[in-house]
Amino acid sequence: MLKGRSFVEPENFSLEELENLFFLAEKMEKDEKFMRESCRGKLLATLFFEPSTRTRLSFEAAMLRLGGSCLGFAEPGSSSAAKGESLADTIRMAASYADAIVMRSPKEGAALLASRYSPVPVINAGDGGHHHPTQTLTDLLTIRRRTGKIEDFTIGFCGDLKFGRTVHSLAKALMRYKKIRMFFISPRELVLPEYIVRLLQKQKIDFLQKESLEEAMPELDVLYMTRVQRERFFNEEDYIRLKDTYVLNREKMEAAKKNLTVLHPLPRVNEISVEVDDDPRAAYFAQAKYGMYARMALLALILGAA
Ligand code: CP
């Protein structure tokens, strides 16, 4: 039962619970009427202390499509955080108005802290360079929709693996599935955090860390491109030096498998050339749409409507 539960990291839900959520999301995608009024009368608070297009809008679209309503803010300057209110107090207030809270913060651990103060479920919509578990739901659902299963494939994560919270959440989530091989492709300055490398080793996951995308390309079933996270750099010069390390273009796609799936959490800056958008292997815009169905299923489950 997911009713009343917070979602701070992907591992908060068992594989069986995730399977049930994906089943519901697929039903919601295929049947426009399925569960459409199931959250009528419920309120979702969306508290975004960092910019967002997809996560915030897809959560709001999800809640509205379920018949519920939304309130919240899209940037901290329009909340009393700008006057110095603590996160704990902001969360206590939001929880007294709404039935669930979705929050994004630049601070690692903020969603976990919020979940400890909140009597209603808290959903982590991104906490600094740490985790982004509902993006992982989106990513897993897309893989499932494209390949029919979440097992036995080789995935390459490419780009900013140090600050890319979507990579951290997806890599950790995939460690629980069978026969997943992982390539981590990044410049040396942006390698995966040590704690995730240690987890991969501990769980005996088949993985390699590389600098060359070209070398990995022919091996991959899924390529997960990421943006270099400018907002997490201390130094603009380092960002400028590293930002275009990897640019996926038509030429690089020629070396890939015919049934490759290219994912990207978006927004993209320059790391996927627009000429790749028309390639049938490019799944990143479909992925963003699956995100809305994944979030609909999540809301229906934690609000006790499913
Ligand atoms: N993928 C993602 O988190 O996008 P936004 O930052 O636009 O929400």
Image (cartoon, rainbow, N blue to C red):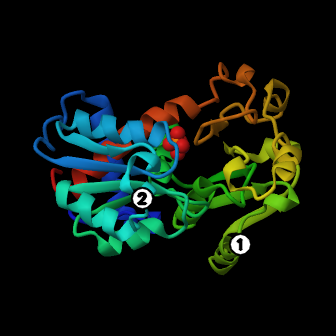
118 with respect to 55 (left or right): left
Q: Nearer the viewer, residue 151 or 233?
A: 233
The CA distance from mark 2 to mark 1 is: 40 Å
Q: Looking at the image, tell me whether mark 2 or mark 1 is earlier in sequence order.
A: 2
Give the structural element (helix, strand or loop) at label 2: helix
Marks 2, 1: nearer the viewer: 2
Question: Which residue is labeled 1 in the image?
Answer: 197
Which residue is depicted at the point 83% across and 34% down?
255
Q: How many marks?
A: 2
Q: Nearer the viewer, residue 274 or 155?
A: 274
Name the outermost residue toward the left: 41
User: Disc number at residue 245?
Assistant: none
User: Disc number at residue 83?
Assistant: 2
The x and y percentages for residue 258 are: 70, 31
Q: Nearer the viewer, residue 99 or 165?
A: 99
Task: Inspect the image, locate mark 2, and give the three-letter code of the amino acid beneath it.
Answer: Lys
Ligand 1 near label 1 (Cβ, under 8 Å)? no
- Is residue 273 shown above or below 263? above
Task: Inspect the image, locate mark 1, and give the three-letter code of the amino acid beneath it.
Answer: Val
Give the structural element (helix, strand or loop) at label 1: helix
Q: Is there CB contact under 8 Å for labels 2 and 1?
A: no
The x and y percentages for residue 104 are: 46, 54
Which residue is depicted at the point 50% across and 41% down?
52
Q: Quadrant of residue 129?
A: bottom right
Residue 143 visible at all: no
Residue 217 visible at all: yes
The x and y percentages for residue 158 are: 74, 49
Q: Nearer the viewer, residue 156 or 54?
A: 54
Can you say which quadrant of the picture contains the N terminus? bottom left
233 with respect to 268 (left or right): right
256 with respect to 72 (left or right): right
The x and y percentages for residue 194 are: 72, 74
